[in-house]
Amino acid sequence: MPDPSEMKLILFKARKRKERGGFNLVEATLSLGILSFGFLTLAPLLALGLNTARIAHANRDSAQIAQTLIEEARQGTLSAGTAYLDFQGNPVNSAGASYTAQSTFSPVSQNTTLTRLTLRVTPVGAPDRARIYAVVISAN
């Protein structure tokens, strides 16, 4: 029969072996389920963020295009009508266009030296996101 001190040592070693860390299959499955549920609840926020980023990018591009066209109008090189533009505001044909810009000139009341320029910049394929810019320019 083993000595009682040896029995304690054997029981201590056996107990120590059982207390190892780690996860069993049930715990791993449960944690994966909780993580999946969390990701599924955040997925609509990701879609909303991507949509907002796309709209902000289109708004920025529209404003830059309008600024370029306003500078052309001040220099006297912009004509009234529809222009087809790429993302940077460079003129392209209608098939390769990312934006359309419609420009109209109208006199400001009785003053012959001032002209009102109205620009309507629209992303191709998204007429609901059209932006309208108006500026008064001098005909000097």
Image (cartoon, rainbow, N blue to C red):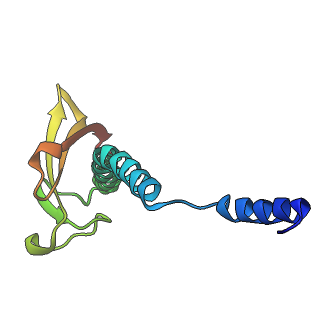
Residue 5: which quarter of the image? bottom right
Q: Position of residue 100 (x, y in %)?
A: 15, 58
- Asked if residue 126 is positioned above or below residue 111 in the image, the reply reads below
Viewer-side residue, 91 vs 86: 86
Q: Toward which corner of the image does residue 76 lie, by quadrant?
A: bottom left
Which residue occupies 39% across, 47% down? 34
Please indicate whether residue 75 sits to the left or right of residue 12 in the image: left
Residue at x 31%, y 40% (from the top left corner): 138
Of 79 and 127, the residue lying toward us: 127
Residue at 79%, 60% in the rendered image: 12
| The C terminus: image quadrant | top left
Q: Observer-nearest residue: 33 or 24?
A: 24
Q: Position of residue 14 (x, y in %)?
A: 72, 64
Q: How many tags in the picture?
A: 0
Q: Quadrant of the N terminus?
A: bottom right
Whether residue 29 is situated above or below residue 114 in the rendered picture: below
Q: Residue at x 16, y 68 (%)?
A: 97
Image position, residue 117 (x, y; %): 21, 42
| Residue 70 visible at all | no
Residue situated furthest top in the rendering: 109
Q: Is residue 33 visible?
A: yes
From the viewer's perspective, is 67 left or right of 105?
right
Q: Position of residue 124 (x, y in %)?
A: 13, 59
Observer-nearest residue: 67 or 115? 67
